[in-house]
């Protein structure tokens, strides 16, 4: 790998509904063709909460409030495969049902899916999303990579 090496910080927002399902999107650009929870990179000077609120509004058009941190994911496999190292702050918010999620960036996302987190995840699945869902289900904050 050439060029500067650095770690990017992002948030991944696990959105659950009243039935305990999580919302996934099928990516169609940078992370194509992966399924994933929603989120994105933290801007300089931005809180994790503000990032989550901004990204969810931009990506699926819903307003969220009080997203909470439940885990931390160090996405080593993505680094090994793509040379991009990300650390994801895993956040949770309960969907309030007021506005239906919709694809706001058709160039980045092609479909939405509510799924039980205990069902097999659609493949291929983005590592940061898979890690967040595993942390959520296991009620662990972090899974070591030793």
Image (cartoon, rainbow, N blue to C red):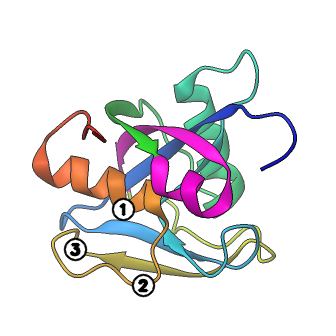
Question: Badge 2, how many Cα within 10 Å: few under 14, some, many 20+?
Answer: few
Q: Looking at the image, which is closer to me, 121 or 20?
A: 121
Residues marked 2 and 3 touching at CB (< 8 Å): no
Q: Which residue is mark 2?
A: 123
> Quadrant of the rendered structure where residue 74 is?
top left
Question: In the rendering, at what x and y percent does residue 141 appear?
Answer: 23, 33
Residue ID at (38%, 84%): 122
Numbered label attached to residue 89: none
Q: Which residue is mark 1?
A: 130
Residues marked 1 and 3 touching at CB (< 8 Å): no
Q: Which residue is mark 3?
A: 116
Q: Is residue 19 left or right of residue 65?
A: left
Question: In the rendering, at what x and y percent does residue 111 appear?
Answer: 58, 83
Residue ID at (23%, 82%): 120
Residue ID at (27%, 39%): 146
Question: In the rendering, at what x and y percent does residue 67 appear?
Answer: 41, 34
Residue ID at (34%, 54%): 131
Q: Which contiguous range is marked in magenta?
A: 76-96
* Secondary structure category for the residue under label 1: helix
Q: Is residue 97 left or right of residue 17?
A: right
* Sequence-first tag of 2 and 3: 3
- Mark 2 or 3, closer to the camera: 2
* Sequence-first tag of 2 and 1: 2
> Quadrant of the rendered structure where residue 97 is?
bottom left
């Amino acid at each position: 790998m050439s060029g500067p090496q650095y770690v990017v910080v992002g948030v991944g927002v696990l959105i659950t509904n009243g039935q305990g399902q999580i919302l996934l999107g099928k990516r169609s650009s940078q992370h194509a063709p992966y399924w994933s929870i929603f989120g994105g990179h933290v801007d300089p000077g931005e809180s994790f909460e503000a990032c989550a609120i901004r990204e969810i509004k931009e990506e699926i058009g819903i307003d969220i409030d009080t997203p909470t941190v439940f885990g931390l994911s160090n996405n080593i496999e993505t680094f090994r495969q793509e040379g991009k190292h990300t650390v994801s702050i895993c956040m949770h918010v309960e969907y309030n049902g007021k506005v239906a999620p919709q694809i706001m960036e058709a160039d980045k996302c092609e479909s939405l899916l509510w799924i039980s987190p205990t069902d097999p995840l659609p493949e291929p699945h983005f590592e940061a999303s898979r890690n967040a869902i595993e942390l959520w289900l296991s009620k662990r904050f972090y899974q070591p990579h030793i």
